[in-house]
Amino acid sequence: MPDWLSPAEWDALRLSLRVAFWATLVSLPPALLVAHALARWRFPGHGLLNGLVHLPLVLPPVVTGYVLLLTLGRRGFVGQYLDQWFGIVFAFRWTGAVVAAAVMAFPLMVRAIRLSVEAVDPKLEQAAGSLGASRPWVWATVTLPLILPGVIAGAILAFAKAMGEFGATITFVSNIPGETQTLPSAIYSFLQVPGGEGAAARLALVSVAVAMTALVASEFLARRAARRVHGR
């Protein structure tokens, strides 16, 4: 283990990567469904769904975390039943950090995928359907390959967003070293103690490096997927 990061700093980095990975993974299936619904379907409540999806982008993150605490906390509307019936607890656990990060990253993923779906010519899907293919098969064999660049870009951007999430996370799961202390929380903690500026600066550099790597990877993979889709 390199000595330029302390064990506590490595713990925060590992936890952030773990939280961001699972937040992205659990967000992807519903993001695909919601993005497709918003792009292709018209139904009562379409505008409401669109507003709810993008609400975390405009609400203060602390408010989002507070809503999660009221909903999924041990005494929350849903959380009390998850605890009593299934023994599932999210508040003040690393799994709660996953939930908070997923909620905050979800709008970015949905938006990227939705734009890709809207760019696909519906006539291609209709042509496949006219040949007898079922809707799920058309989506899997026609739509999904065409929107793959947007899916990749959305997933990586969501990962980067989850890595940097602070307000909703610290409100919902607090800042417990080794359990819920992610990179942003660790930076905040180090800045509150005398002599912690060096550790905060190191973690800030790590955060910048991870974010830039994610953005570059997103652009590269999206372009590569686009070339494969278009046969270039």
Image (cartoon, grey):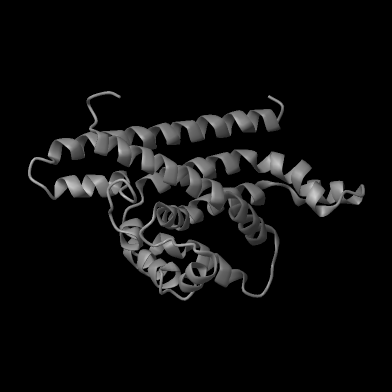
**Is residue 130 in view?**
yes
Q: In which quarter of the image is the C terminus?
A: top right
Q: Which residue is drawn at 57% across and 34% down?
A: 222
Q: Which of 180 and 83 is in front in this view?
A: 83
Rendered position, 192 above or below 70: above
The percent position of residue 86, horizontal first and vertical second, equals 54, 65
Q: Quadrant of the N terminus?
A: top left
Q: Which residue is drawn at 15% across and 47% down?
A: 191
The percent position of residue 4, horizontal first and vertical second, equals 22, 26
Left or right, 134 with reference to 9: right
The percent position of residue 16, horizontal first and vertical second, equals 37, 43
Residue 2 location, quadrant: top left
Q: Which residue is drawn at 30% across and 43% down?
A: 183
The percent position of residue 218, horizontal first and vertical second, equals 50, 35
Q: Nearer the viewer, residue 139 or 198?
A: 198
Residue extending furthest toward the left: 194
**Is residue 123 in view?**
no
Q: Which of 221 and 192 is in front in this view?
A: 192
Q: Which residue is drawn at 15% across and 35% down?
A: 198
Left or right, 52 with reference to 185: right
Residue extending furthest toward the right: 131
Residue 230 location, quadrant: top right
Total numbered badges shown on the rendered structure: 0
Left or right, 112 with reference to 160: right
